[in-house]
Image (cartoon, rainbow, N blue to C red):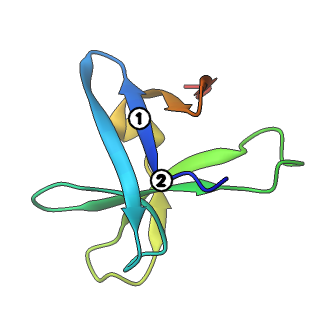
Amino acid sequence: MKITEVTLKRFNAPDWKFSKDDQFDGLIHRTNHNVYRIFSGDISEEYKPFWIGRLTDDKTAWVTWEKELKARAIKLIGCTIFFDT
C-alpha cells in the first residue's frame, strides 16, 4: 500500500498536510517560500525512522527541520508516530 497523504501534527500550530509529489518523489508540503518533505529512514534506525526535511535555498540538499516546525507527530493509515522533540 502506497501512502499518498500524511498529516503533520504540530505543537501550538496548525496541522500540515503532506501529499504525494512526483517532482520531489515523496510526500511534500509547500509554503510560499519553502518546500518540506517527509523522509522515512531504515526501520532498523530506531532513533529516527521518520524525519522532515526542508529544501535548501539553492535546491541542492534537504536539512532536518522537525524542531523548527514544532513537529509533534505524523498521522498515517490509522496510526500516529510521535517525534522525540
Residue 81 position in % (x across, y down): 62, 27
Residue 44 placement (x, y as % from top left):
90, 48
Q: Residues within 10 Å of mark 1 (few under 14, many from 20)?
A: some
The residue sitting at 51% across, 32% down in the picture is 74
Return the residue found at the far top. Answer: 12
User: Which class describes the residues within 10 Å of circle 2: few (<14), some (14-19), or many (20+)?
Assistant: some
For the residue pair 73 and 58, the one nearer the viewer reads as 73
Q: In this view, does 1 lie above or below 72?
A: below
Quadrant hosting residue 48? top right
Residue at figure coordinates x 22%, y 61% from the top left:
34
Specify the amino acid type for callout 2.
Thr
Q: Which residue lies furthest to the front in this view?
A: 1
Quadrant of res 57: bottom left
Q: Which of the labelled discs sits on residue 7, or is there none?
A: 1
Residue name at image x 47 percent, y 53 percent: 4
Tell me which amino acid carries mark 1. Thr
Q: Do the residues labelled 2 and 1 touch (CB within 8 Å)?
A: no
Pick the residue in front: 45 or 4.
4
Which quarter of the figure is the C terminus placed in?
top right
Q: Which mark is residue 4?
A: 2
Picture coordinates of residue 75, whole percent (x, y): 51, 29
**In the depicted view, which residue is nearer to us: 78 or 13?**
78
Q: Is residue 80 left or right of residue 58?
A: right
Reply above or below: 71 against 25: above
Tell me the SS state at disc 1: strand
Secondary structure under the numbered disc 2 in the rendered image: loop
Image point 46% across, 68% down: which residue?
62
